[in-house]
Amino acid sequence: MASNATDVLIIQYNATNVLDLQDASHNLTNDTSQDAFPTIIATALPNIVKTMEPVLANSYLQSSLNFFFFGTVLETGRRLWQFLMDKFTGGFVLTAIFDSSDPAYEWFFSYLNDEKIWSSTREFRVTAKTTSRTWGVNSASNGNDEEGYAEYTPSYDQPQLFKYEGTYCQVTRTKPEGAAHGLGHEDGGQLVLTLYTRNRSVLDNLISHARAQYLKKAKPRLVVHGTDHCGSWCQVTTKARRPLDSLILPTGVKEMLLGDAREFLRSEQWYADAGIQHKRGYLLYGPPGTGKSSTIHALAGELDLEIYALSLSANGLDDAGLSRLIGSTPAHSIILIEDIDCAFPSREEKKKQKEAKEKGIVLAETQSRITLSGLLNVIDGVSSEEGRLLFATTNYVNRLDPALLRAGRMDVKIHYKMSTQDQISNLFKRFYPARKEEAATPSDKKARRISDLELTPPPTPSTLPADSTATDPNPTSDTASPKFAVDTTPIYPPRLPQATVDQLAERFASLVPQNKFTVAELQGYLLTVKTRPYEAVEGVVKWMKEVEEERERMQREKEEEEKREEEEEKKEKEEQEKAEKKEKEEQEKTEKKDKAEDDEKKEKAEDDEKKEE
């Protein structure tokens, strides 16, 4: 009914309005006086207003007008507020963005974690604790493990307010692009810091404080950075620092490496004055298991440097990405490229591949998108970075291109060989340290000759001295563990006198021939008898025999495999030659047949010509 009434009113309004306008137009046409127009308007306006009164009194129209009016006021107020806020934030607020691929991200996240700024967060991402560092709020622990077994990482887009030096700050962790597109990349993203102040020094002090606190916290452990699938420094792994004394190398190698690296780090100004690029390259080459990677880890811990491990075969990494990665590493850091020979073939291998391709043999090619020129450019080209220590390792130095080996790219080259007598003896002493309170004297060392040393059976806890048991010297409980229960009691080697350890080490080194086994192989054997030094000496001959038999077996299998491949290649070559010969014979037959047919046609044509004549 209301709708019908409204329609009637509108129709009435339209009809009346049309009549008034028609009368006004008729009067205006008939009246040529200029003063008649205001009179006509004054006469028609009251009728128009009177006609619109029912329409204006309609509740639906009034509500629509009210909504339109208040909506306009609210939108105008919102835009005015946004304008004022933009002016305020532009002049009175500082904003800093920390990207996960930059070291400053680690500094600031460590500061937020130490200062318990994330403590009020109510949304977390829980992951099992690993060596990969994820800056969590805290760790879930069973009461015995101080570090816990789970990580609580704050969720994304959860702003947190805190105060620094009397200034209010707000931090928000944003979601990375990979997670938004379902790529499974949950770590990373950005930290957006907002400081409600115009003083830039507050931001400078905060970053300096965060960096100093981070370096202090990270000092007890070695930090190793890796790349993610996007080609950025993202993955961070922490490891216990390895003492340089625990590194078993030939005499003088550790001292030379450490002294050279320290001198380089102190010589930045000298390099600048001399006009030489401040960079240093080290190439460690030799058989696997000789201690190349261990040397780099121990050296990084000794120099308080972080390692940036770079894989040249990473997916999607090209020359431009390599240059970007190297450029984003901080000064006074170690860039590590392991197995550099696997990245791309040398010039000799390229020549072999070309020759094989010409013969129709397809060889496997490298999958790396990095070129040799791109790698050389980041090492010592125009785009190379200074202040870094570059370490490269390889098992086969003869596979490297000579351009990589020249001075200025690889300044120090160290050949790692099989274990020497000194290395074998020092490795044994590291596994079985002597009692510290008892120092060896010359008379103790000469008390018994090595040939007279008895190789007694493995000592048991009942036969060992009270201070040299193979378990924790300070056990927490004397009760036996229940059946099938996991024994978590720490294991310790027996603490023998220094003279005994020296004699055992000398005997062990005399039984193992030098330049035949790697340190890793000997270490693997000693790990099987880590609490039984006498058994380690007694069983090393048997172990060496087993290793030799294993090597011979693997060598035979390798030779058989090579022989089989040669036979298969020879067979394929013979089959290919037979196929080519058969194809050639068929082609010759076809050519002879075609020639015979052509001759026959030619003779026939000549006969026809003669007959016509």
Image (cartoon, helix red, strand yellow):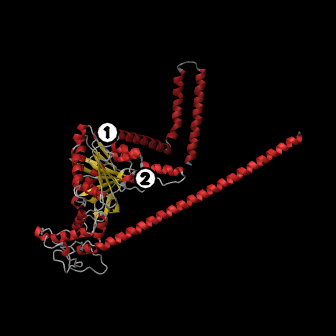
Residue at 50%, 61% (x, y): give it: 566
Q: Report the residue marked by disc 2.
A: 315
Q: Secondary structure at mark 2?
A: loop
Crowd rating for badge 1 (residues with CA inside 10 Å; few <14, some 14–19, many 20+): few
Name the residue nearer the viewer: 361 or 591: 591
Q: Measured from the top left, where is residue 91 in percent x and y? A: 29, 38
Crowd rating for badge 2 (residues with CA inside 10 Å; few <14, some 14–19, many 20+): some
Q: Amino acid at mark 1?
A: Gly
Report the side of 160 relative to 11 (left or right). Answer: left
Q: Earlier in the sequence, mark 2 or mark 1?
A: 1
Reply above or below: 383 against 544: above
Residue at 58%, 20% (x, y): give it: 31
- Residue 487 visible in the current orientation: yes
Residue at 56%, 40% (x, y): give it: 10
Query: Separation of disc 2 and disc 1 at Cα?
Result: 41 Å
- Residue 320 visible in the current orientation: no
Q: Measured from the top left, where is residue 376 in percent x and y? A: 37, 44
Image-quadrant location for residue 427 = bottom left
Reply above or below: 522 against 335: below
Report the side of 84 relative to 591 (left or right). Answer: left
Q: Report the residue marked by disc 1.
A: 90
